[in-house]
Image (cartoon, helix red, strand yellow):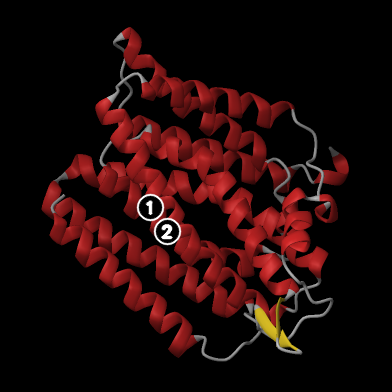
């Protein structure tokens, strides 16, 4: 894709983010499920419209790669929602301020993921063997996800939290929606800023898995980038839509591990001159995700 597509896409995203912060969410408020559902649908439909333009301009293969990458990134990002719930509950962040934290968190995620995507795709283009490293890493991650027990959510023992308290003056109480405050001419960061940093860090850790997975679908950096951005833009609204019952998806990790393992194997197979089409990949991803969600409802956690 030429520079025009890159510039045009990023201008579109910046305009939408500006409208999100300064128009539609100018005042802090509690995002209700109905509102979250509307915006989740909006971002999904916008992604599908964009995919239609990809199809018309670059053909069926690029459109399939975008759709597969989008669904893959969206499904892997759901795991991030569990972490959001834990962080917000631990710090007792008022619901009306959660949107602000997620807005700036996702803006930071866009910057970090852009750098990671450009670096990752450039490495694979220049050094083809890097793809096998990514593939092996995804298979390892998939196995680890299957065998690990519930993660320890002792956030107060998180090294990052300790570092922030060591190098910054952190207020004990929140100061409305502010990340920084001045007290007696001394600059302090608020607990809301600590929450923001933890949100950013969690996304960075998840991106280490998800970006190589999408690169396993396509080496086109523009497709990897745009599918990632659309997925994480819809992530905030999925959080507000699903946060009240997301813990019911207790079998989701098995579906995600299957998806990561499959993509990892897909990246390793070209070494044996075996290739799996993106249509097949899309179907397998959809089946694994769908079955894990359905199974979570059919077999509630208290009976497992």
Q: Which residue sits at x=75%, y=79%?
A: 94
Which label is found at residue 70?
none
Marks 2 and 1, how far apart in space?
5 Å
- In the image, is residue 250 above or below residue 13? above
- Residue 234 appears in the picture as rendered: no
Return the residue at label 2: 111
Q: Which residue sits at x=59%, y=77%?
A: 100
- In the image, is residue 108 above or below residue 256? below
**Element carrying mark 2:** helix
- Residue 202 appears in the picture as rendered: yes
CB under 8 Å between callouts 2 and 1? yes
Q: Which residue sits at x=41%, y=71%?
A: 42
In the picture, the quarter occupied by the C terminus is top right
| Left or right placement of residue 162 versus residue 285 in this view | right
Return the residue at label 1: 114
Extreme residue toward the front, this view: 185
- In the image, is residue 263 above or below residue 186? above
């Amino acid at each position: 894709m030429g520079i025009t597509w890159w510039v045009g896409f990023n201008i579109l995203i910046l305009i939408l983010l500006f409208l999100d912060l300064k128009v539609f969410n100018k005042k802090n408020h509690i995002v209700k499920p109905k509102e979250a559902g509307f915006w989740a649908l909006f971002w999904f439909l916008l992604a599908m419209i964009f995919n239609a333009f990809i199809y018309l301009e670059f053909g069926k293969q690029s459109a399939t790669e975008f759709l597969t990458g989008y669904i893959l990134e969206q499904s892997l990002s759901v795991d991030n929602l569990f972490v959001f719930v834990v962080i917000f509950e631990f710090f007792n962040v008022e619901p009306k301020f959660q949107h602000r934290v997620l807005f700036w968190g996702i803006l930071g995620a866009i910057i970090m993921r852009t750098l990671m995507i450009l670096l990752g795709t450039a490495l694979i283009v220049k050094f083809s063997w890097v793809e096998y490293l990514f593939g092996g890493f995804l298979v390892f991650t998939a196995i680890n996800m299957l065998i690990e027990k519930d993660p320890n959510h002792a956030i107060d023992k998180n090294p990052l939290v300790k570092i922030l308290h060591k190098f910054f003056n952190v207020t004990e109480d929140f100061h409305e929606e502010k990340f920084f405050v001045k007290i007696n001419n001394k600059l302090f960061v608020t607990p809301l800023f600590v929450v923001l940093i933890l949100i950013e860090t969690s996304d960075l850790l998840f991106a280490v898995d998800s970006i190589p997975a999408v690169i396993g679908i396509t080496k086109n950096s523009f497709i990897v980038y745009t599918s990632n951005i659309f997925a994480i833009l819809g992530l905030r609204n999925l959080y507000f839509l699903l946060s009240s019952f997301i813990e019911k998806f207790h079998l989701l990790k098995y579906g995600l591990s299957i998806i990561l393992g499959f993509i990892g194997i897909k990246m390793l197979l070209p070494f044996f001159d075996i290739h799996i089409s993106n249509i097949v990949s899309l179907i397998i991803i959809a089946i694994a995700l769908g079955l894990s969600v359905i199974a979570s409802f059919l077999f509630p956690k208290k009976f497992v």
